Amino acid sequence: MQTNEIIQQFEKYVISNYGRLPFVITKGAGSIITDSEGKEYLDMFPGWAVSGIGHCHPKVVDAIQQQAGQLIHMDNTFYNAQQGQLAQMLSERSFGGKVFFCNSGAEAVEAALKLSRIHTAKNKYKIISVEGSFHGRTTGAVAATAQPKYHKGFLPLMPGFVYIAHNDIDGLKAAFDDDVAAVIIEPIQGEGGVRLASVEFLQTIRDLCDENEAIAIWDEVQCGMGRTGKWFGYQNYGIEPDIMTLAKALGGGTSIGAIVARAEIADSLVPGTHASTFGGNPLVCAAGIATIEAIEEENLLENANEMGRYAQAKLNELKDKHNCINLVRGFGLMIGIVLNEPGAEIVAKCWEKGLRINCTQGNILRFMPAMNVTQELLDKAIAIFDETLTELSGTTSAEE
Ligand SMILES: *Cc1c(COP(=O)(O)O)cnc(C)c1O
């Protein structure tokens, strides 16, 4: 099928809830993707943070192929070895909790919200969440997402959510009362523009949750699984949650979500309270196991740290050169470039030149390469970015 035929087929048969670029991607390998015309692009935002160890990592491909020949799906009527092993791996690398598996980030958030409410019972129902957050698109997750643009058309929202400003400790204290079941926060906001929680803010959430018998939920769907240079974003702060949500990079590209919950909380999720038909199936769990093994065998946490430092230093050099860059922030390879102007045109021009990056919140570029990115690829990507900024500043001043 020709590229234009594929696009026409989408127009006719696929619901158009995405603003898609008119390209068909046919292949991915590491940090390189290829379109149907054979053109290659450097992917510095692989799979919206899903392909955390790059596209089609050979170890993950191998694990999927082997597992597919053995058993693809088995329901939770029985045990399967892969689910238990992946749960143990996540528990041992985080805070020693127990794991529930689902299929996406939003589902992980839903599971965390339901577990918080059922655990704190006694009519506690309020969930505090933070402005600029993104927790997913299901009804509960949208209500947890404290950004009005995601609420449009879906009012009234699921009740019980209380929104506070980011890093606002006084606002947090004021919002706390006996009805609060949980606070949900991304230690490092992703869609919100790589905004970091302050240490004091995260610590105050932790303390207030302890004092009020509420649950601290860290949404690690985007910042978890190694890209910040630690297994989980919160480990950069040293402040543990009661429940952590995971998805995106967890399955090496397959659809998997999970929560990790402290054991005494986790035990409130008894049969009949929550479930997922696909959750924890052998195929995606095998991919998750292979992903974690690859990160360890190839020292990718270390590489994310080292390459993150390198990329941030290089991008900071560009800040001195290009007025449009306000600041560069992040941990490891979770990098946000805050612009003084809209970023859409920059992203479009980079794409034309064979570089994929992302723009969020209108003016924040997300640069989130795979954890196994090399210095050579970063140099290439940053050179294209530099060239793009030079060209665009040229055209803007000419137009002015
Ligand atoms: C992407 C994201 C979600 C939603 O994940 P889906 O898999 O799209 O449902 C939730 N929380 C955070 C922090 C995310 O980045």
Image (spheres, rainbow, N blue to C red):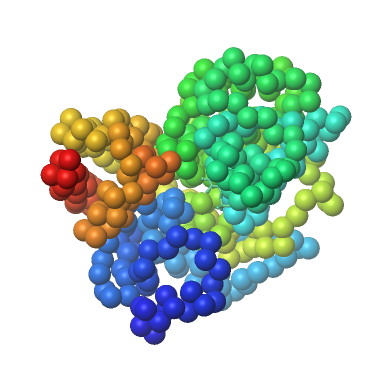
Q: In the image, what residue occupies the spot 48% across and 74% down?
A: 11
Q: Is residue 4 above or below residue 359?
A: below
* Direction from residue 67 to residue 209 in the image, left or right: right
Whether residue 366 is visible to the viewer of this picture, yes or no, is: no
Residue 53 locus on image (x, y percent): 40, 53
Q: Is residue 341 above or below residue 284?
A: above
* Direction from residue 112 to residue 168 in the image, left or right: left
Residue 319 locus on image (x, y percent): 22, 33
* Residue toward you, 268 or 110: 110
Residue 294 locus on image (x, y percent): 42, 53
Whether residue 384 is visible to the viewer of this picture, yes or no, is: yes
Q: Is residue 368 above or below residue 16?
A: above
- The residue lying furthest to the right in this view is 122
Residue 161 locus on image (x, y percent): 70, 34
* Residue toward you, 10 or 317: 10
Q: In the image, what residue occupies the spot 62% across and 72% down?
A: 71
Q: In the image, what residue occupies the spot 70% across and 20% down?
A: 176
Quadrant location of residue 116?
top right
Q: In the image, what residue occupies the spot 21% across and 58% down?
A: 353
* Residue toward you, 360 or 367: 360
Give the quarter of the figure containing the N terminus: bottom left
| Total tally of numbered discs in the picture | 0
Give the quarter of the figure containing the C terminus: top left
Quadrant location of residue 209?
top right
- The residue lying furthest to the bottom in this view is 1
Q: Is residue 99 above or below residue 339?
A: below
* Direction from residue 368 to residue 346 in the image, left or right: left
* Direction from residue 153 to residue 323 in the image, left or right: left
